[in-house]
Image (tube, rainbow, N blue to C red):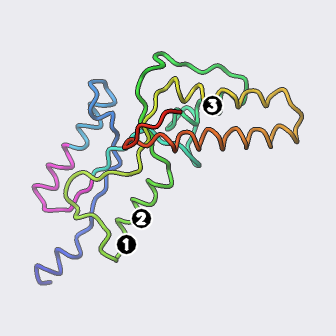
Amino acid sequence: LPEADRQAARPQIVLSSSTQANHDNPYGRSRLAAEQALEAYAASTGTPVVIYRLPGFFGKWCRPNYNSAVATFCHNITRGLPITVNDPSSPLRLVHVDDVVEAFLRLLAPSGEASTGKGFEEVGPEYATTVGEVAQLISPLGKVLTLGHGAKWCIAKAEFDKVRDRLVMRRCDHSLVM
């Protein structure tokens, strides 16, 4: 194959990393090491590489006690379980899972929206809040536990919608107060 055809056929590697790569803890160091190994591979082979340093997630498909503090809080509060907030003022940056999926799908798009395959990409919009603020917003969901089944669902849905709407208002590029 001509060189141009070989370059066009080269697969693009996408790494889903974490903003924790900036932290000096075992998980952060492992994420940073993975990024550096992939960047070295890209430099030595010319393989296009895209790295997403993702913040916290919220939205559908998030799993409690796995990939989302928001999902963990919702899970625990609606089951009458305690939540742990070590530092309420600790910053929390979030992206909605649908925005992550859209960003990844754009990489597959033949329309030219795809990344150049060089370096870091961002997913947005990103929402800025604190751990304490999210805990405070989600806490009213626990009130539905004392109600009957029919009312429980309606109130839980209404409370969840309020929480989601208030999180969405907290865009990083705005200074809205909840």
Q: Position of residue 13 (x, y in %)?
A: 28, 59
Magenta stretch: helix, strand or loop mostly: helix
Q: Is 13 drawn above or below residue 64 in the view shown?
A: below
Q: Quadrant of the N terminus?
A: bottom left
Q: Position of residue 174 (x, y in %)?
A: 40, 42
Left or right side of 145 for 75 = left
Q: Magenta span has 39? A: yes
Q: Tell which circle, 3 or 2, labels the residue nearer the N-terminal end.
A: 2
- Gap in Å between the C-alphas at discs 3 and 2? 30 Å
Contact between marks 1 and 2 (CB within 8 A): the answer is yes
Q: Which residue is mark 2?
A: 105
- Gap in Å between the C-alphas at discs 1 and 3? 36 Å
Residue stretch rendered in magenta on the structure: 36-50
Contact between marks 3 and 2 (CB within 8 A): the answer is no
Left or right side of 25 for 46 = left
Q: Is 138 drawn above or below residue 172 in the view shown?
A: above
Q: Which residue is mark 3?
A: 138
Name the element at disc 3. Answer: helix
Q: Magenta span has 80? A: no
Figure quadrant of residue 90: top left
- Residue depicted at 61% across the width and 38% down the height: 163
Name the element at disc 1. Answer: loop
Name the element at disc 2. Answer: helix
Q: Position of residue 176 (x, y in %)?
A: 46, 37
Q: Which residue is mark 1?
A: 109
Question: Residue 117, labelled with which disc?
Answer: none
In front: 177, or 59? 177
